[in-house]
Structure formats: C-alpha cells, structure tokens
Image: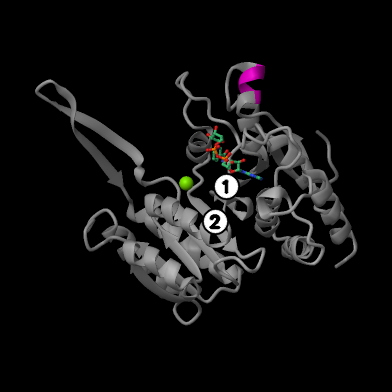
Amino acid sequence: MTHGSNKIPATLIPGDGIGPEIVDAVVQVLDALGAPFAWDHQQGGMAGIASGGDPLPGATLDSIRSNKLALKGPLTTPIGGGFRSVNVRLREEFQLYANLRPARTLVPGGRFDNIDLILVRENLEGLYVAFEHYIPVGDDPHAVAVSSGVNTREGSRRIVRYAFEHALKQGRKKVTLVHKANVLKALTGVFLEAGRHVAKDYEGRIAFDDRIVDACAMQLVLNPWQFDVIVTTNLFGDILSDLIAGLVGGLGAAPGANIGDKAAIFEAVHGSAPDIAGKGIANPTALLLAAGLMLDHVGLTDQATHLRKAIDQVLNQDNIRTGDLGGKTSTSDYAKALVQRVGSGL
Ligand code: NAI
Ligand code: MG
C-alpha cells in the first residue's frame, strides 16, 4: 500500500470472533485522534485458515517483519488439527521478549480504586519453553512427568533492563522483581542476580526491591498500591498479570504489548469471545488501550494520553458503557462517543 512519508506503516490483523468489530471501532477512534498509522490489513487465525490453510500466513509475517509494528485482534486457536498457538508462534518468530501488561482503574467504585500498575513479563524463557517429557513406569506411560525451565543471564538482564527503561519513560518510581529464588535457586536465582546487577545502573533514579512470588500475590490483594512496576519470569508473569487485571475489573480493560527488538505487537488480553461475536456488543476498550500503548511505543505520548483521557470521560462523565461494564451501549455507539470526545479536544 502507499502512504505519505509522515505516516507510520503498521500491520492490522482484524482477527476472529469479536475481532473485526472491535478493530473497526479502534480504527475509527484512532482516525478521529489523528493517529498517523498507515494500516496494512492482513489475515490471521480462522480467517488465515480459510484463505490459505495457515492461521499465521506468510504474507502476515512478511508484513510484520517489514513494518515492525502491528495491532491485532484476538485470534482463535483451532482445537485439534495440530495447530500451535498463533500467539506463541508470533512471540518466537519475532523474539518478542517483553510482555507489557499495565493495569489501571477505569471505572471507580470497584473493589480496588486508583490502581495504576505495570507488569513486565519475560515472554520467551522460563518454564514456558516447555521442555517436557514423561517417564513410564510399569504399565503407566505417564507415571512421572518432567519439565525443565530455562532462564539465561542474558535474557534476564534484557527483560529487567526493559522494565527499568520503561519505568523511566513512564515517570515511574520503583521496580519490584518477583522470583522464587529461595526454592528454585538456579532457575529464578539467576533472574534475581541479573536483576540486582541491572538495578545498579538505575540507582538514584528508580528504586528497586524484590519479592517472593507467593508473598507478592498476597500483597497485591492486600495492598496493591505499594507496587509500581513489577518485572518477573514467564510463568509468574502469566499468573500475576491476570491477578492484576482482576484488580481493575477483569479482561475488558486489560491491554497487552509483546515487544522485541525486531517488532512490537499490540493486542487486548482477552480472546475472540465467540459467545458474543457478531452481536455488536463487545467492549473495544482493551484494544483501544493497546492502541494507546502502541502510540506510546512510537513516541506519540500526547496522543496516547489524549486517548486515555477520552476513554475516562466517556466511561465516567458520559456514563456510556458496554454491557460487560454494566451499560447498554453497543460497540459502535461507544465508538461514536469516543470519536466525539477525542474530537472535542477534551
Ligand atoms: P475470551 O477472552 O474470548 O472470553 C472470555 C469471556 O469474556 C467471554 O464470556 C467473553 O464474551 C468475554 N469477553 C472477552 N472479551 C470481551 C470484550 N471485549 N467485550 C465483552 N466481553 C468480552 O476467552 P475464551 O472464550 O477462553 O477464548 C476464546 C478464543 O479466543 C479461544 O479460541 C482462544 O484460544 C482465543 N484467545 C486468543 C487470545 C489472543 O489472540 N491474544 C487470548 C485469549 C484467548
Ligand atoms: Mg495468561
């Protein structure tokens, strides 16, 4: 596709289920905002299978490779048929080592108010390398299950450094490293060691402390406000990022970014929601917030802030909300309200 030189080329994958509906809403709002993306539309998920038999077509990979930037709707991973998770394939293909999961209270009055946390999860190593096998004993083929995790010093330093750099950019005050080095002395000990090493470079600028993962889980529920930026290994990050999404009311408001040196892919944390697909009632907020992270990522912080403000105002001043947040508004009317707010200059 052609685009002006001031445009930023980016791959756009509508995805499956509610994907096309929420992507449509997001593109409308970004247009109203004047976000300078030149979208290269590509297929993925079931749509990819329908067109060429692969949920992650070569053309989609080529597009991401050349644009280095993508916004994607949720992709349905077909059950059976030997398809690997598209999301895992993307992470590996582009070495997207950092998974960024911010959580911020959008609608006050929930169980926790004024939450504003960032979780940075290592996305390629740890127990999720899934080096697993069974050892048969007697007539039981699954008598013993064995799994090995892999954390490298290099990978650990890279993710902790990413967390500190992100903290600096976002004006954050503290990074907390979460581990289980008292038990998994090698696997998560190397992560803690690397973290302490990297933290020295930020002394006087960003505070650093560490927590054991189980204690951290409890503290996140008792007093989440003590945390600012959390950095942790793959498995712990998977679990804690969902916990943190729960603190701000669940999936509807949870954006995610997968970031590497070769590419960055932005998405909502939720899936394709087949139960409500095609009904025009899906909440596009998580994907909108992901688009906000994308604007941050390319340095358009003012537009990102403007977008987040518009979302706050539509939800809390206009009281326009989709069904999952207790409202009655359709996806398209919610998008219209956002377009108005964005255009009004707030
Ligand atoms: P899901 O997140 O799609 O849905 C869980 C529940 O939340 C459903 O009741 C759904 O209606 C609701 N929900 C999700 N997003 C919503 C939104 N934006 N607005 C209103 N309600 C929303 O999880 P589920 O059902 O387990 O997975 C469905 C498919 O999505 C599966 O094929 C799965 O593999 C895929 N998936 C893809 C992801 C991705 O592409 N990043 C992430 C998670 C799941
Ligand atoms: Mg998860």
User: Residue 109 in the image: x percent, y percent?
Assistant: 63, 68
| Vertical order, 228 against 336 (above or below) | below
Q: Secondary structure at mark 1?
A: loop
Can the viewer see residue 13? Answer: no
User: Residue 273 in the image: x percent, y percent?
Assistant: 61, 37
Q: Is mark 1 within 8 Å of ligand 1?
A: yes
Label of residue 15 in the image: none
Q: For residue 144, which quarter of the picture?
A: top left
Which quarter holds ligand 1?
top right
Q: Secondary structure at mark 2?
A: strand
User: Residue 11 in the image: x percent, y percent?
Assistant: 70, 39
Q: Which residue is mark 2?
A: 101
Q: Mark 1: which amino acid?
A: Val
| Vertical order, 90 against 107 (above or below) | above
Is residue 197 magenta-colored? no
User: Residue 248 in the image: x percent, y percent?
Assistant: 57, 61
Chief secondary structure of the magenta portion: helix
Q: Residue extending furthest bottom?
A: 204
Q: Which residue is mark 1?
A: 269
Give left or right: position of 40 versus 273.
right
Q: Quadrant of the N terminus?
A: top right
Q: Nearer the viewer, mark 2 or mark 1?
A: 1
Give neighbour class at mark 1: few <14, some 14-19, many 20+ (Cα, 10 Å). many
Find the distance from the CA under tag 2 to the CA under tag 1.
Answer: 9 Å
Magenta residues (range) = 47-51
Can the viewer see residue 62? Answer: yes
